[in-house]
Amino acid sequence: MPTECEYCGNALTPEEVEHPEPEGNICNSCYRDHFEFDCCRCGNPEHIDHQHVFCAVFEALTGLGGDVEPGVYELVRFPYYADGVIEGYVYHESFRRVRDLDFESTDDYPMGHLCRTCRKDLKLRQSKVGRELQARQKETSQ
Ligand SMILES: [Zn+2]
Ligand SMILES: [Zn+2]
């Protein structure tokens, strides 16, 4: 019976031993760091498998091919951003605008990702291109 977190080596709590995650024997804090993100709309944690699907842009992002204005977007191409020498930038064509922004961010980032619950709330539907992108992504990560 494993009693230590595979990531940080700390002792697991009895609950963590009893209910292991599909990803392995991992403490709650490492699980949050490695496998979860916080939704930018409701602030709830969501699994990273669902992170790079729909995003909200709160402040215009510098983009190659044009800036990405505030709004809600589906990501339709990877990678969607690049690290620059001074500042990173995004690829304009990776963003498909799906609706206007009518909520505020729960943190200070100019861009955030949406959980599945918020996607449903906002009635966001994946495009064919987006679905194919996610399917390819799954294949390469396995
Ligand atoms: Zn840990
Ligand atoms: Zn949410």
Image: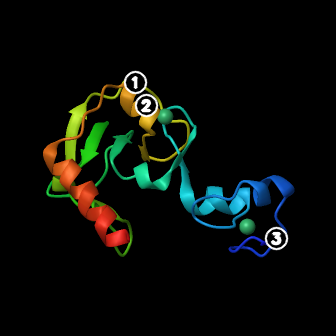
Residue 87, compared with residue 99, is above or below; it is below
Of label 3 and label 2, which has the lower sequence position?
A: 3
Residue type highlighted by circle 1: Asp
Residue 33, compared with residue 85, is above or below; it is above
Q: Are marks 3 and 2 in contact (CB under 8 Å)?
A: no
The quadrant the N terminus occupies is: bottom right
Q: Are marks 3 and 1 in contact (CB under 8 Å)?
A: no
**In what quadrant does ligand 1 lie?**
bottom right
Q: Residue at x 53, y 44 (%)?
A: 108
Which label was assigned to residue 56?
none
CA gap, disc 3 and disc 2 = 36 Å
CA gap, disc 3 and disc 1 = 40 Å
Which label was assigned to residue 121?
1
Mark 3, residue position:
3
Here the colouring is rainbow
Of label 3 and label 1, which has the lower sequence position?
A: 3
Q: Are marks 2 and 1 in contact (CB under 8 Å)?
A: yes
In the figure, is residue 11 to the left or right of 8?
A: right
CA gap, disc 2 and disc 1 = 5 Å
Q: Is mark 2 within 8 Å of ligand 2?
A: yes
Of marks 3 and 2, the one in the foreground? 3
Residue type highlighted by circle 2: Cys
In the figure, is residue 132 to the left or right of 9?
A: left
> Which x, y percent locates residue 100?
28, 27
Q: Residue at x 72, y 54 (%)?
A: 19
* SS for callout 2: helix
Instruction: Classify mark 1: residues with Cα within 10 Å, few (<14), some (14-19) or many (20+).
Output: few
Residue 83, compared with residue 104, is above or below; it is below
- Taking the view exactly as shown, the residue that stands out farthest to the front is 1
Mark 2, residue position:
118
> Which x, y percent locates residue 135?
26, 57
